Amino acid sequence: MAEGQRPPEVDRVAASRRAVAARRARAALKRDVAMRVISPQELLRRALADPESAAGAMRVTDFLTAIPAIGEGKRDRILAQLAISPVKRLGGLGARQRRALAGFLDERWPEPGPRSGRSRLVVLAGPTAVGKGTVAAEIKANYPDIHLSVSATTRPPRPGEVDGEHYYFVDDAEFDRLIATDALLEHATVHNKYRYGTPREPIDRVLGEGGTALLEIDLQGARQVRRAEPSATLVFLLPPSWDELVHRLIGRGTEDAEERARRLRTARAELAAQHEFDYRVVNEDVATAARDVVAAAAR
């Protein structure tokens, strides 16, 4: 190309589109950290594994302010403390800077690990619309050695749901009776609307026979099970990204706009609790997620 000659229009358009796509990818990653879909350590690992990726191209300033509770003032103090230039990108950090940033993250936001002495009672929980029911159904269909608990609920059946197979659909009076007779391992009110609970007798029978019992429940129920059975294995199901979680909730079409907004607010709080669990599994592909949950149960 001769000196001073402008690049062809098609090249400029393509370059502009690539730049826009790169900015969107970085923005999506920042949302994932802010919403706690991924940990700061996970984003840093992605950046270091591929410096040319969206994670690698992210400026360290943007990375830090994406972390909840870090504003610009705190960000600047952290960078000064770690001796990292604010113009640095994550993929361009030197070896010393990588160690310093990773150590800072691990000290303040340690990633959880599995506890010892866990039992064959497995709890699968996660935010709304993440696909817990779909993954549990995949396990039920392909891993017959694992008993999937059927919950009782006061909410009405959704299209295609069968009483006794997907849930035990009961009224409030019957649910009150189950609580009064201590027939539920856990129970909770979800989204300030309907009650859910896990019948205790089938779980006790499976565990007594040496089998594995899987509970697909919400966060409140998971915490109750942990208090009642501290040895339970806790697995948290994550979406591939925050944007995908929103897409799944909208695409499901089972809630109105007000209900969707309420569920997304709940999802943000639920995602913040993932550190309470032994394992985290990403539900990007249902079969893979089911296999990973089963593998966690066997460890």
Image (spheres, grey):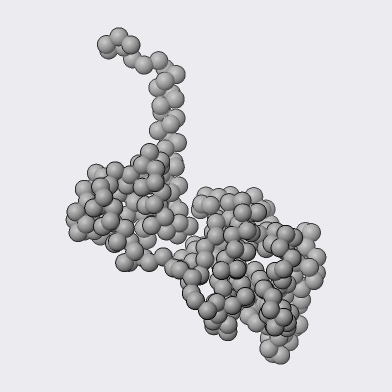
Quadrant of the rendered image containing residue 158: bottom right
In the image, is 98 to the left or to the right of 81? right
Question: Quick check: 67 above or below 16?
Answer: below
- Image quadrant of residue 186? bottom right
Closer to us: 279 or 129: 279
Q: In percent of the image, x 29 and y 52: which residue is there?
A: 98
Q: Residue furthest bottom?
A: 181
- In this orientation, which residue lies closer to the viewer: 51 or 299? 299
Residue lying at the far top of the rendered structure: 2
Q: Nearer the viewer, residue 116 or 66?
A: 116
| Residue at 60% in and 57% down | 289
Q: Please say whether residue 271 is visible from this viewpoint.
A: yes
Residue at image point 28% right, 56% down: 99
Residue 77 location, x and y as percent?
21, 58
**Residue 203 visible here:** no
- Point out the image quarter for the N terminus: top left
Q: Horizontal and vertical percent for residue 72?
A: 27, 55
Q: For the C terminus, which image quadrant? A: bottom right
Q: Residue at x 55, y 60 (%)?
A: 281
Residue 55 x, y percent position in the rendering: 39, 45
Q: Is residue 169 left or right of residue 220?
A: right
